[in-house]
Amino acid sequence: MAELIGYAVDGGVARVTLDSPANRNALSVALLTELLAAVEAALADGAVRVLVLTGTGPVFCPGVDLKEQRRANEAGVPAPAPRLMTQLFTALVEAPKPVVARVNGHTRAGGMGVVGACDIAVAPRSATFGFTEVRVGVVPAVISVTTLPHLTSRAAAELYLTGEVFDAARAAEAGLLTRAVADDALDAEVDRVVAALRQAGPAAIGETKRLLHRPARPLPEVFEDLLALSESRFASAEALEGMRAFTEKRPPSWTTT
C-alpha cells in the first residue's frame, strides 16, 4: 500500500504532507493513523524546531472520508476517524513546537479543524473553504474545539450555520487563516514565517504555546463530550441521507422541501 503521508526533515523543519490523491487527502482512518505518527515523530525529534503541514494537489483536505464514514454508520458501528481526529488535534495544539499550515488548496469540514489546530496558517487566494457539515446533516462538533477560538462570533454563526463556501480573503478576515497571499507567494511567505519562528528560543516557544492554548477544561474531556455529539449525528437518518446524497452527487432530500 502506498504511503499517504510524506515526511521530510531539513534544516530543523519537518514537512508533513497529506498525499492521498485517490480521495483528495480526505481524513480516512489510514491517513489519520499515518498523519498522527508523522506528527509524533516530528515532536520526538530533537533536531526538529518547526512543523510545516501541507498537502499535494489542488485540495488541502476535504474533511473525513464520507464513504468510509457512511459504511461504518450503516453497519451500526462508530467510525474511528473522529476519535483519531481528536488525537491529532490534541497533538498539534499541545505540541511544544510551532506548527505552520501551508494550506495548498481547497479545505472543507474536518480539514478546517486541521487548519485551526495549527498555530499559523497561510493559504493562496485561490483556495476556498467551508464548514460544510450541516449540508450533509451533521455538525462541526469536534472541529469546533480548534476553529471557534480563531473565529469571531458573527463569522462562526454565519459560516457554521449556512455551510457556504468562502474564499481565502474571507477566511483570513474571519480569523481562520493568518494570511491569504498570492498563489505564487505561498512558499515565500511560509519560508518567512518559518525563519521567524526559528529565531525564537525553543523552550520559550513551548511555554508561549501553553499560554495561548490554556483550555478551561482539559482537551480530552472536551473532545469526549463532542465525540458523543458527533457520533450521534453521524448515526442519524438525516446524516445517512446527506452522505448518500454526497456520494451519489445529488441534492439531499431536505433541499426539495
Image (spheres, helix red, strand yellow):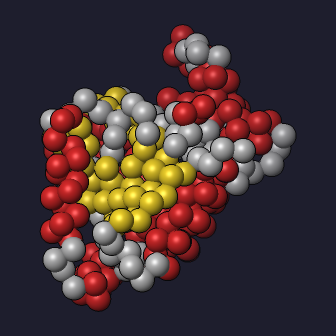
Confirm whether residue 189 shows in the render. Answer: yes
For the point 16% across and 41% down, which residue is it? 185
Compared to residue 136, the image places residue 75 above or below, namely below
Q: Position of residue 200 (x, y in %)?
A: 18, 80
Q: Horizontally, is 17 left or right of 231 in the view?
A: left
Q: Horizontal placement of 133 versus 227: left or right?
A: left
Q: Which residue occupies the foreground of this view, 31 or 256? A: 31
Q: Residue at x 42, y 83 (%)?
A: 46
In this view of the protein, can residue 149 be seen by the observer? Answer: no
Name the residue: 23% across, 38% down: 124
Residue 137 located left or right of residue 203: right
Q: Nearer the viewer, residue 169 or 24?
A: 24
Q: Nearer the viewer, residue 236 or 25?
A: 25
Q: Is residue 91 above or below residue 32?
A: below
Choose top left, top right, bottom left or bottom right for residue 2: top right
- The quarter of the rendered structure image containing the N terminus is top right
Percent of width and height locating residue 107 = 40, 38
Residue 213 in the image: x percent, y percent? 33, 74
